[in-house]
Amino acid sequence: MSQKVELLSPAGNLEKLKIAFNYGADAVYGGVSSFSLRIRSGKEFDRESFHKGIEYAHERGKKVYVTINSFPFNSQINLYKKHIAQMSELAPDAFIVASPGVLQLCKEIAPNIPIHLSTQANVMNVLDAKVYYDMGVQRIITAREISLKDCEAIKRELPELELEVFVHGSMCFAYSGRCLVSALQMGRVPNRGSCANDCRFPYEVYAHNPETQTTFRLDEEKEIGTYIMNAKDMNMASHIDEILSSGVIDSLKIEGRTKSPYYVGVVTKAYRAAIDDFYAGSFDGKRYQKELHTIQNRGFSDAYLISRPFEKNDTQSHDFTIQYGTHQVAALVGEDGLTWRCKDKTCVGDTVEIVLPHGASLDAVDNEYGKIELIDGAYWLTIKKIISKEGREFACIHSGDERDILLPCMLPSYTILRRGIDEALEKKGLVEA
């Protein structure tokens, strides 16, 4: 690998795409329609908005990879052909595919578009990697279960093949997308983009004797819980130095097209810092965790890239499906940088932390709308007035209100305003003051 590793972030819609780039991503991945393996995020993009996203990226020297990584039925093949042709007209930087048949269609219909092989293909070894490389794949997004040593083996055999690995996000308790629990219980098929995340639910376990037709409920050990299939989230930030020192990884991928704008911004910024620090010789594995723990999570694990699956005993979260992070988003600044929209109840007199996009800085401000100051290395905004663009004034504004509220000064596009989780829960009345 002769150049800096790529940081690849999720783009569930146009806003998230722009946030990813503003917070430090080199490239994003996303798609249009149910062929993109995330039905909800596929519907949040239409062809026009996705085209705008690609133009936005290319104007900034960034890249967009199109996900066409579900598995077609015979009745859908013509639809896939049409979709591939339409997507190629938008001039994306690569197609992400999982099916060998779709791979061949892409080569026939859009031979000028590079092909990246989806993690859904579960490539973990040199043999499979070579088969897909010989078919024309430029990059393989490896299985989440692969080890760094196996990546090194693939690169030795196929030095021109690019390798992309997941470093952060949700983990599947089975091979990615190969689980049938969702299909069995909800009729929603994981490898067709509609997983219901049934592995995250609590379950009661029973033992049944067919001879006596007796069924016993098994009580779980105290404080162990009933989330028997719930995998912790992957978090490899503290291992970025090991990954990059190997010299065999071309792209680091963040999972989460259906997650929040806050998740996209904060996680991208944390990994941007880790990557830049590595190349600057100032990597500190603990430094990035503080920000990553501000987001909701299922507990964190460093997954399998550094350690083999059978060597791990901390990859499951038995007692909860998701937990609050240390912070809650209060508001998101618009693209114009002049206004913010409420994400959590906010009132006159509140003081919220300002989370800036990658590389941005601020000057102190104090006027009738608010006060911005730098305290202990963080920027804070104290809100003095809540006034909409239309001139309506409020004492408080609530989540879901779509009014654009004036800022005391211009801030960088998509700046995040947040508060500690205890304060946020107190505002919701979920904890006592």
Image: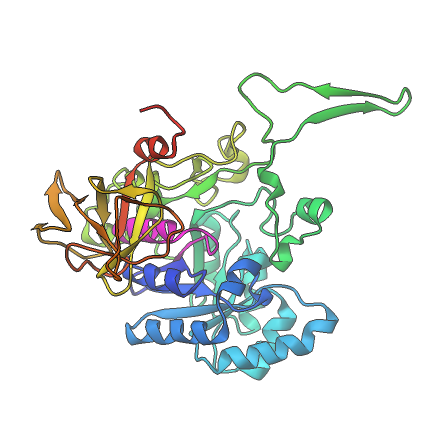
Residue 250 visible, this orientation? no
Q: Quadrant of the N terminus?
A: bottom left
Measured as percent of width and height from the top left, residue 115 is found at 50, 72
User: Is residue 175 or residue 28 the one in the foreground?
Assistant: 28
| Magenta extent | 250-274
Measured as percent of width and height from the top left, residue 332 is found at 30, 53
User: Is residue 344 or residue 298 the one in the foreground?
Assistant: 344
For residue 10, what is the image quadrant?
Answer: bottom left
Tell me if residue 24 comes above or below residue 88 in the rendering.
above
Residue at x-position 60% and y-position 27%: 226
Left or right position of 391 against 73: left
Tell me if residue 425 comes above or below residue 97 in the rendering.
above
Residue at x-position 30% and y-position 49%: 331
User: Is residue 365 or residue 11 the one in the foreground?
Assistant: 365
Measured as percent of width and height from the top left, residue 49 is found at 43, 72
Left or right position of 376 against 12: left
Residue at x-position 51% and y-position 34%: 311
**Magenta span has 93?**
no
Q: Quadrant of the C terminus?
A: top left
**Residue that extends furthest to the front in the rendered view of this protein:** 392
Residue 163 visible, this orientation? yes
Q: How is the image coloured?
A: rainbow
User: Is residue 138 or residue 405 the one in the foreground?
Assistant: 405
Residue at x-position 29% and y-position 76%: 59
Tell me if residue 382 comes above or below residue 74 in the rendering.
above
